[in-house]
Amino acid sequence: MNLSVSVMPTNSPQDQTRSLILDNLPDPLISERGCPPRTRQQIDLILLAIEALELGGSEAMLLAAKELELQNVVKNRVALWRMRSSNPLRRSYTRRPLTLEEAKALVIIASHLARRLTVLIRQLLLAYQQLHEKQVPLENHFRLSEYLERFRAHFRSRMNPRRAKVAAYSSDEKLNELAISLLSQLLFCTGTSGMQRFWSSLFDGEVA
């Protein structure tokens, strides 16, 4: 009896779509150990700022992964936590590498969410600039004060205070400065080719 065997292609349509999305970002020349520490730190901090902007930020990231067909990379909440715990500044630092594919997925998700929050980000940055110029306390703007308070709480609960880089942000003022800087980076991601430029900036001086 002759048996006919059909051979399925190795790449499914979903895999091809996923590859196309990830291919929007170039592959830098880095060590086989994965993304450099600074890259891992910056990606995690950008996501921390998004969490401070939006309640249920982690759920929004998982939903964005599904919408962008990146769920094969960011599979669930545990996978997301493990990727973010590759940040050496975290209390939960796991010493696991962050692959380029994972880093790309997180940057794409962050940029996607930043575009959705563009109006709010612009409003907060404008409010900060006006308050700073008039030397008015930041607490006078409810929405900006709320963002800064959430960011400080997230940072202090998740980062390891024994790390020198974390200890440098022991004051509210320093953490506010970091939070505002991250807002500027998020706005940068929303511009034309902003995601690609932000991605490249993560590896400045870090190539192998």
Image: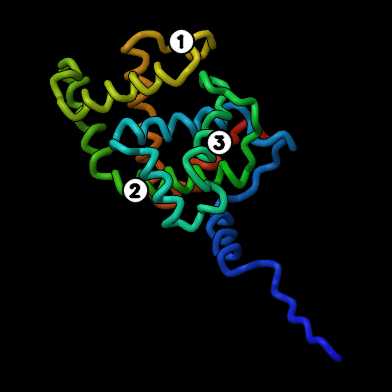
Could you tell which of marks 3 and 1 lies nearer the N-terminus?
3
Q: Nearer the viewer, mark 2 or mark 3?
A: 3
Instruction: Give neighbour class at mark 2: few <14, some 14-19, many 20+ (Cα, 10 Å).
Output: some
Residue 39 marker: none
Q: Is residue 20 above or below residue 150?
A: below
Residue at position x 44%, y 55% in the image: 66
Could you tell which of marks 2 and 3 lies nearer the N-terminus?
3
Query: What amino acid is found at the position of numbered circle 3 in the picture?
Result: Met
Q: Nearer the viewer, mark 3 or mark 1?
A: 3
The C terminus: image quadrant? top right
The N terminus: image quadrant? bottom right
Residue at position x 15%, y 16% in the image: 136
Q: Nearer the viewer, residue 191 or 3?
A: 3
According to the image, label 3 marks what residue? 83
Instruction: Give neighbour class at mark 1: few <14, some 14-19, many 20+ (Cα, 10 Å).
Output: few
According to the image, label 1 marks what residue? 168
Residue 204 found in image quarter: top right
Query: What amino acid is found at the position of numbered circle 1 in the picture?
Result: Ala
- Which element type, helix, strand or loop, lies under badge 3? helix
Q: Is residue 59 in sight in this rendering?
A: yes
Instruction: Give neighbour class at mark 3: few <14, some 14-19, many 20+ (Cα, 10 Å).
Output: many
At which x and y percent is residue 200?
Answer: 55, 41
At which x and y percent is residue 112?
Answer: 39, 49
Query: What amino acid is found at the position of numbered circle 2 in the picture?
Result: Arg
Residue 115 marker: 2
Instruction: Count every numbered label the image shows and give the total.
Output: 3
* Separation of marks 1 and 2 at Cα, in angstroms: 30 Å
Residue at position x 50%, y 14% in the image: 160
- Which element type, helix, strand or loop, lies under badge 2? helix
Q: Is residue 17 above or below residue 109?
A: below
At which x and y percent is residue 179?
Answer: 35, 25
